[in-house]
Image (spheres, rainbow, N blue to C red):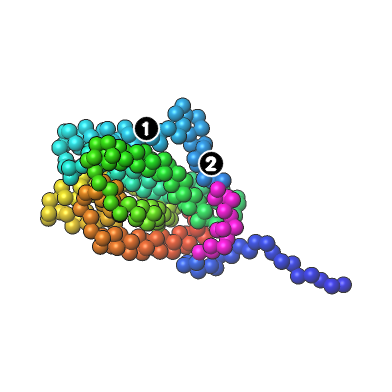
Amino acid sequence: MTQHKQVWTEEIKSDNSLLSINFRELWHYRDLLLMLLKRDFITFYKQTILGPLWFFVQPVLTSLIYIVLFGQVAKLSTDGLPQLAFYLSGITIWNYFSDSLTKTSTVFQTNASIFGKVYFPRLIMPLSIVFSGLLKFAIQFLLFIGVVLYYTFVKEEIQPNWWVLATPLLIVMMASFALGLGMIFSSLTTKYKDLVFLLSFGIQLYMYATPVVYPISAMPEKYRWIVDMNPLSGIIECFRYGYLGSGHFEPFSLVYSAVFIVILLFTGIVIFNKVEKSFMDTV
């Protein structure tokens, strides 16, 4: 009697390299990724009255608050740009980064019950957070484009330039930065849960070290290097310079940001791959 060798459809191993990313396996689970995207986008606003309109309301209200606090009260410079366009440009970028980082940083704790029952590539979870955030970013970006068109053709107060073509690169850099840093924090919070509270406070402080509510030119010369060392500064300044036509932007800052983010993402993957093998023992 001839025996046929059994071929497994899935092979789960724990001895993968820390640097390995099984892209084929990730592609195999693309339906799960799409399902998670649908879940994050629909269920989060399912029982709200305005629904996805909150994506428009939130940045508008935040911009108005910034106009009053930083524009009217604190009298911070906007490099001569319309205040609404200036603050909305920073908010559009910052909201995507901060939301993605916050949610990714707790991916192990939030999904521990699922991870303990079903196998799938753990990297699917942080990827779903970053991609679902892009849906919200796209809606807020359309709002920002509407403001840019208004101040370009109606008010004629801003002049966009060819740097707007760098937008896809800036989005990829933001997503990679949030993903890499989020995976590092998610790995650490499996043992040190207090880091979740520290991160929430740290993100608020980090915003003020990033040119979101002020231009780099408004910083005193002796402290400007601190903001220049921030990898988000080059991204925001490039975004603002491209769409609003003004700002303290140097192409080298974008190169520095790209190198920093690649190293951070590499580090995040290594740490994430290491922790995912044993995190159930500590969560």
Q: Which residue is drawn at 56% across and 46% down?
A: 35
Q: What residue is pinned by disc 2?
A: 39
Q: How far apart are marks 2 and 1 (CA)?
A: 21 Å
Q: What residue range appears in magenta? A: 21-34
Please state which amino acid type lies under the numbered disc 2: Arg
Q: Compared with residue 130, is residue 39 higher up or lower down, i.e. above or below?
A: above
Q: For residue 62, which quarter of the picture?
A: top left
Task: Note whether residue 113 is visible.
Answer: no
Task: Note whether residue 134 is visible.
Answer: yes
- Mark 2: few/some/many CA within 10 Å (<14, 14-19, 20+): some
Closer to the observer: label 2 or label 1? 1
Question: Percent x, y for residue 215?
Answer: 20, 47
Classified by dominant secondary structure, the portion drawn in magenta counts as helix
Please state which amino acid type lies under the numbered disc 1: Val
Q: What residue is pinned by disc 1?
A: 57
Viewer-nearest residue: 97 or 236: 236
Kindly state the secondary structure of the residue where label 1 is placed. Answer: helix
Left or right of 220? Residue 152 is right
Viewer-nearest residue: 70 or 158: 158
- Mark 1: few/some/many CA within 10 Å (<14, 14-19, 20+): few
Q: Which residue is drawn at 26% across and 60% down?
A: 251
Viewer-nearest residue: 185 or 164: 164
Left or right of 116? Residue 222 is left
Question: Percent x, y for residue 128?
Answer: 49, 49
Please tell me which of labels 2 and 1 falls first in the chain.
2
Left or right of 64? Residue 16 is right
Question: Percent x, y for residue 166?
Answer: 34, 55
